[in-house]
Image (cartoon, rainbow, N blue to C red):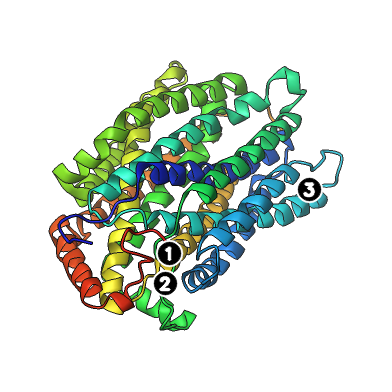
């Protein structure tokens, strides 16, 4: 493989891999509805539901580094990642259907126990699938800017799921279903079929490159983790994602209640309809951005892309009290024109940064460890998402919200508004600061890639690549 022309997989494989990402987003999207439906639909306490939804994420987060490390060192006849993708997609599809067969006639402890057990099973399957699917995607190209295009194509399919996810609660409320619980059951069944279909498109069409990786050396899990966390660019990137997710998740969690009870004055259909319209607009914008992601990466660089996205998100956080107005509910759509494209840009460029970090790690350690890097990111993300779900539950409770009331007192809603705004401002500012401190640039990675290619050519017997074309032998 010539250093002047880095390997890139055929478009057929890139799109097949990207389609498989829909399975990941469908699993977490359906599971994520539990906070809303078990509080508003079932009338359960938001704090208790928050604890019940935190536990599965903690369990999965603990398992992530172990399974990611195992995946890196797996050498089966089907590859390192595919067995994990196949099993987790099959079980994940089953569990997202079973999750919604709780019943209102059950006691509250029974409902929460059911959510806890099924939620844990769902989340483990989601975690295993996402880790193995993401690690497979990092193998698709060695080109610095082409990685942005690959992640943009993945983002294209992600926006489709995000659009659908924005309509889920609205759709579940349609009279034809007879209530949101019955509606979500039908929706989950359709989502399960899509999970299986999209996952198997990836399995049948993508070939793994690094099937020979790590065969001659093995690093135990704890030394491997220690080495991973010594990688300075990776640690800075972890902090960036930590602050980004905290700001986004806490704000979004409270906005669900503010949209219904503050902006739309208790009208669930209007609030969820506006959410669906916003998601649709975001999808259209996302489609338009896909062909621009590689030029954006080449023109301003991945780091500057993260900085610009974080800066605009900070401005939106500061102006949020002006945008959320009960007399103008559709004004809630205004941030959509900026926020969803920013999320797409940040996630796309962020996803394209991780394989750069894996290249740097290979140069330093001689090992391909996409699974472990992905798993450590997953561990941090799930721990913080677990905390944000719990924090949202406590903030909702602290505001004085009562799920049994059709409308909420004005002091409660004003308190909830500021509980949503202030953390968002703080964390988006921290996101901006860490983005500005990220050290890897295109020049740095060009040099890293040159050294790796020279090493592979000088010692082909030690190369982790399956064959010279990049396909598994």
Q: Which residue is mark 2?
A: 212
Q: What is the secondary structure assignment of the residue under circle 3?
A: helix
Mark 3 or mark 1, which is nearer to you? 1
* Location of residue 455 in the rendering, given as x and y in whole percent from the top left corner: 22, 74
Residue 371, numbered label: none
Q: Say few, some or many: other residues with alpha carbon within 10 Å of mark 2 (under 14 / 14 to 19 / 20 or more).
A: many
How far, Cα to Cα, is label 3 from label 2? Answer: 47 Å
* Location of residue 198 in the rendering, given as x and y in whole percent from the top left corner: 55, 41
Which quadrant of the rendered structure holds the N terminus?
bottom left
* Location of residue 263 in the rendering, given as x and y in whole percent from the top left corner: 50, 24
Q: Is residue 266 above or below residue 311?
A: above
Q: Which residue is mark 3?
A: 111
Q: What is the secondary structure assignment of the residue under circle 2?
A: loop
The answer to which quarter of the image holds residue 134 is: bottom left
Q: Say few, some or many: other residues with alpha carbon within 10 Å of mark 1 (under 14 / 14 to 19 / 20 or more).
A: some
Tag 1–tag 2 contact (CB < 8 Å): yes
């Amino acid at each position: 493989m010539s250093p002047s022309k880095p390997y890139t997989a055929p478009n057929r494989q890139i799109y097949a891999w990207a389609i498989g990402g829909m399975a990941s987003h469908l699993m977490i999207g359906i599971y994520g509805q539990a906070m809303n439906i078990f509080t508003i639909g079932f009338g359960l306490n938001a704090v208790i539901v928050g604890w019940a939804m935190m536990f599965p994420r903690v369990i999965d987060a603990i398992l992530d580094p172990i399974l990611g490390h195992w995946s890196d060192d797996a050498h089966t006849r089907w590859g390192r990642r595919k067995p994990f993708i196949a099993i987790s997609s099959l079980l994940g599809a089953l569990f997202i259907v079973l999750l919604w067969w709780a019943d209102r006639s059950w006691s509250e402890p029974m409902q929460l126990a059911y959510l806890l057990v099924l939620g844990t099973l769902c989340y483990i399957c989601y975690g295993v699938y996402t880790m193995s699917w993401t690690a497979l995607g990092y193998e698709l190209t060695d080109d610095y800017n082409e990685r942005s295009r690959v992640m943009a194509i993945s983002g294209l399919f992600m926006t489709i799921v995000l659009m659908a996810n924005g309509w889920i609660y609205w759709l579940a409320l349609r009279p034809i279903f007879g209530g949101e619980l019955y509606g979500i059951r039908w929706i989950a069944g359709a989502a399960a079929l899509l999970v299986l279909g999209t996952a198997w498109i990836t399995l049948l069409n993508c070939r793994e490159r690094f099937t020979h990786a790590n065969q001659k050396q093995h690093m135990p899990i704890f030394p491997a983790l220690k080495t991973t966390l010594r990688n300075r660019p990776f640690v800075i990137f972890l902090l960036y994602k930590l602050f980004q997710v905290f700001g986004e998740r806490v704000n979004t969690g409270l906005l669900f209640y503010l949209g219904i009870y503050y902006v739309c004055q208790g009208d669930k259909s209007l609030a969820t309809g506006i959410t669906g319209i916003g998601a649709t607009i975001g999808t259209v914008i996302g489609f338009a951005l896909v062909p621009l992601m590689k030029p954006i990466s080449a023109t301003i660089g991945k780091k500057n892309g993260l900085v610009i996205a974080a800066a605009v998100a900070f401005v939106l956080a500061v102006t949020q009290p002006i945008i959320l107005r009960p007399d103008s509910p559709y004004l809630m759509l205004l941030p959509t024109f900026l926020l969803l494209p920013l999320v797409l840009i940040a996630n796309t460029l962020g996803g394209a940064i991780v394989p750069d970090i894996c290249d740097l790690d290979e140069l330093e350690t001689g090992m391909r460890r996409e699974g472990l890097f992905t798993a450590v990111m997953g561990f941090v993300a799930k721990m913080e998402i677990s905390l944000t779900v719990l924090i949202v539950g406590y903030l909702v409770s602290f505001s004085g919200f009562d799920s049994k009331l059709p409308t909420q007192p004005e002091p409660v809603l004003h308190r909830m508004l500021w509980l949503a705004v202030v953390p968002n401002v703080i964390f988006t500012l921290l996101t901006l600061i860490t983005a500005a401190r990220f050290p890897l640039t295109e020049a740095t990675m060009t040099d890293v890639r040159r050294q790796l290619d020279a090493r592979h050519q000088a010692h082909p017997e030690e190369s982790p690549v399956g064959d010279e074309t990049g396909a598994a032998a």
